[in-house]
Image (cartoon, helix red, strand yellow):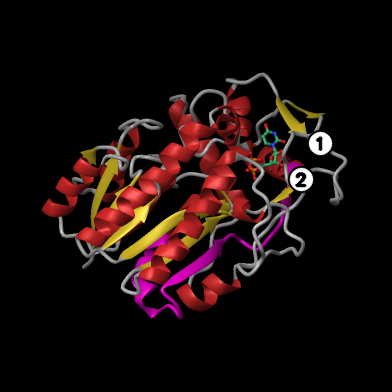
Amino acid sequence: MKKILLTGGAGYIGAHTAVELIQKGFDVVLIDDFSKSDNSLLDGIEKITGKKINFVEGDCKDSTFLDQLFRKEKFDSVIHFAAYKSVNESVREPLMYYNNNLRSMTELLQVMGKYNVNEFIFSSSCTVYGQPDVIPVDETAPFKKAESPYGATKQMCERLLEDVAAANKNLKAISLRYFNPVGAHPSALIGELPIGVPNNLVPYVTQTAIGLREKLVIFGNNYQTPDGSCIRDFIHVVDLAQAHVKSIEKINEMPSNNEAFNLGTGEGVTVLSLVKKFIEVTNVNLNYEIGPRRTGDIEKVYANPTKAKDLLGWQTRLSLEESLRDAWRWEQKLANKPI
Ligand code: UDP
């Protein structure tokens, strides 16, 4: 079985992926610098899998740390989750975002080259497309000018990977373009831990429902969509995690040594209908109102996930109802309320 390094392994998507890989019998090493996370999800991973995890605290911009780690462990593959991901923060602190997200990428690829580790999976985002001309969007769509420094780092990392893969044919690279990951593990032992006031819709919804926030504001109801609110493709984080397992399994069967895949359900859902669905699924009285548009928001985007189905043999299985139910169970667990 392959030995796999997960950078950012203590984060939301890293932790869910660790669970799926461990349950499939892969040998997994997690690293995290805890700059945007803490060790609470690590306990959850151990509880779900019943296995002691191999975790090392460290920063993947730190070449000495990486060198020691790669010398000790004989990795087959790297899944690179570690990155800053707040759109708002990236607008306020662009240098911090470029420095962190680009440097961790170059340092990792460098150490991989030195130790002849050739399989690399990168956490990308549908933000690379901007507002696509054709929806559902497929992987051939051009990158529009990024709406934020965060989005620009994802575009730049994909470009960087393209260049490195062109120069080194031994490298096998896959970029996974996440649409909107939501939900939590059905055990409610791991889930999302937003820092401060959440920017993302579903954590804001669950925090409002539990009473941590006064009300949810829906940003705009005059878009060109059926109910006027924005359209997104909300994907259950467990489905998303399983796509990483498939990528690890299939990485040597790809048509080229650098491929990108959309990870979405293929269904566009309006913000307002998600909110209504949450109320229906949970029976919770959610205080919400319509407010002005949020600057930089894309009107509508959802995936054409056909390529992932054809080449990775992956598709989503979990519904929006399950995502919202699991997100709510996790929020209740955090608040120590009975679920
Ligand atoms: N959204 C909202 N209220 C909030 C947070 C988000 O109406 O408090 C909307 C936002 O305008 C967007 C959608 O929910 O249309 C998804 O936003 P999120 O930030 O979760 O993801 P992204 O915009 O990056 O797709």
- Residue 230 circle label: 2
The residue located at (46%, 73%) in the rendering is: 312
The residue located at (39%, 79%) in the rendering is: 253
- Residue 220 circle label: 1
Earlier sequence position, callout 2 versus callout 1:
1
Query: Can residue 244 be seen?
Result: yes
Check the picture and name the quadrant holding the N terminus. Answer: bottom left
Asked whether mark 1 lies closer than 8 Å to ligand 1, one says yes
Q: Which residues are magenta?
A: 244-271
Circle 2 crowding by C-alpha within 10 Å: few under 14, some 14–19, many from 20: many
Q: Secondary structure at mark 2?
A: loop
Q: Secondary structure at mark 1?
A: loop
Where 70 sits versus 93, above or below? below
Circle 1 crowding by C-alpha within 10 Å: few under 14, some 14–19, many from 20: some
Q: Amino acid at mark 1?
A: Gly
Asked whether mark 2 lies closer than 8 Å to ligand 1, one says yes
